[in-house]
Image (tube, rainbow, N blue to C red):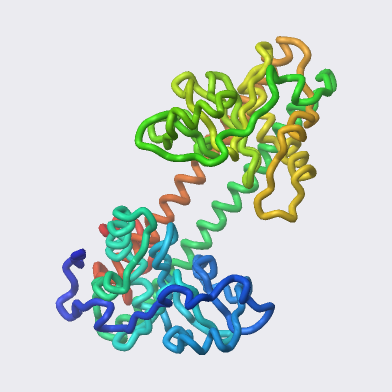
Amino acid sequence: MTVELPALPAHWGNSRVDRVASVNARIGWKALTAAEYQPQGFTFLSTPNIKGREIDFDNVNYITEFRYQESPELKLREGDVLLAKDGNTLGIVNLVKYLPRPATVNGSIAVIRPTGIDGAFLRYVLASRVTQAAINMLKGGMGVPHLFQWDINRLPVPVPPLEEQRRIADFLDVETARIDRLTQLRSRQAGLLEERFGLALDKAFENATYEPTRLKYLLAVKPRYGVLVPQYSDSGVRFIRVNDLLDLAGRADSLAKIPDELSSQYARTVTRPGDVLLSVVGTMGRSAVVPPQLAGANVARAVASLRTRHEVSPELLATWLTTPSFLRQASDVTGSDTAQPTLGMEDLSNFRLSWPVDERGRDELLLVTSTIRRHQRELTGVLEVQRRVLTERRQALITAAVTGQFDVSTASGRNVTDGVNA
């Protein structure tokens, strides 16, 4: 793999990771198992602990002193750079700014210890578009993404003078913190919008003229789980999973596939246009109506298939399945003590709701709820665009700063995030 840096300022050097730092990672687990974790002891960081802006030293696992001492090269120090080298989180990078207690890392994290470069600056180099593009190239060619030490050692590193490295890192600390705060605000706004529109949907279904009923009386057949253990194939029957419910029609051409003979064993969940699909394992409340182009597909075990009576609007039922009222009943049934709550089909069939008794009432309710959901999509879409722009600007700002595209001593992130070419 060859990765080229853009043209650097004349007084900067051009190096690579193994010339400015040491790289160490745990080779396997040395037979370490989760059963060895301790209630207290030596901090054992995993990838979730380094995903945030700061390293999370609170929600961690602990290991014994023996396990901590057996890999001295992985005993963390302030200034170490941590890089996720395995799985879907490949490329996440963070800096050990302080150590509240002795700590080490698991096999998914590489410890990069600067020897000829400022650690904070190196952290931003590894987070830049140049490095992340190289990592994504490696990720694309693997079933289980993995970054070998050989790859990490050869990642290119621009090397300005040490004092300039520190200025760049200080500048990026301030400006990325400002962008991160804005991103967090947009996420909070999205959550508040979801809550507001959820309450509006609940209120729409609380009409005094509607008839209290149970879900099973709106269905033509009992709800069904889908395929238990899928075997994926290059051709066969399209296969709908929980995440596909977020944009079912849009993902129709990119769905996974399972063999025809496997799908035929689950004939009762082969889809028809108008079927309502619902997530019932783990994440609750994602629903979608099967569009005509997905007739004959099948669904995962985590997705229930509901077929409505002819007078029941699938779109209206799919909307109710996203309401706080539905989610409260799901929570009451599944509880909150399990990491993977599963909604039983018999419980689902007996969920309570209010439903219009005549066609006019159903049409009016469908109009009201469709309007609410359209407004929600529009406002949520605006926030999502803003979050995406902020993420892109953050990455562009980091890349421009660590490759010398502007002088941070005279620049401010408030006026350089527009038009940055990186």
Question: At 83% across and 23% down in the image, what residue appears?
Answer: 212
Residue nearest the viewer, comparing 205 with 104:
104
- 154 or 196: which is nearer to us? 154
Where residue 354 sits, quadrant-wise, is top right
Place of residue 304 in the rendered image (x, y in percent of width and height, measured from the top left): 62, 33
Would you say 179 lies left or right of 16 here? right
In this rendering, would 177 be left or right of 128?
A: right
**Is 357 situated left or right of 163 in this image?**
right
Q: Residue 293 appears at what percent x and percent y?
A: 44, 21
Q: Quadrant of residue 339?
A: bottom right
Q: Is residue 70 above or below residue 130?
A: below
User: Could you tell me residue 244's position as x and y percent?
Assistant: 50, 37
Q: Residue at x 53, y 41 (%)?
A: 229
368 vs 337: above or below: above
Please, is residue 123 above or below residue 192 in the view?
Answer: below
The mark tally for this picture is 0
| Placement of the N terminus among the 4 image quadrants | bottom left
Which residue lies at the image location 75% right of the left edge and 29% below the top edge?
Answer: 349
Q: Residue at x 15, y 77 (%)?
A: 10
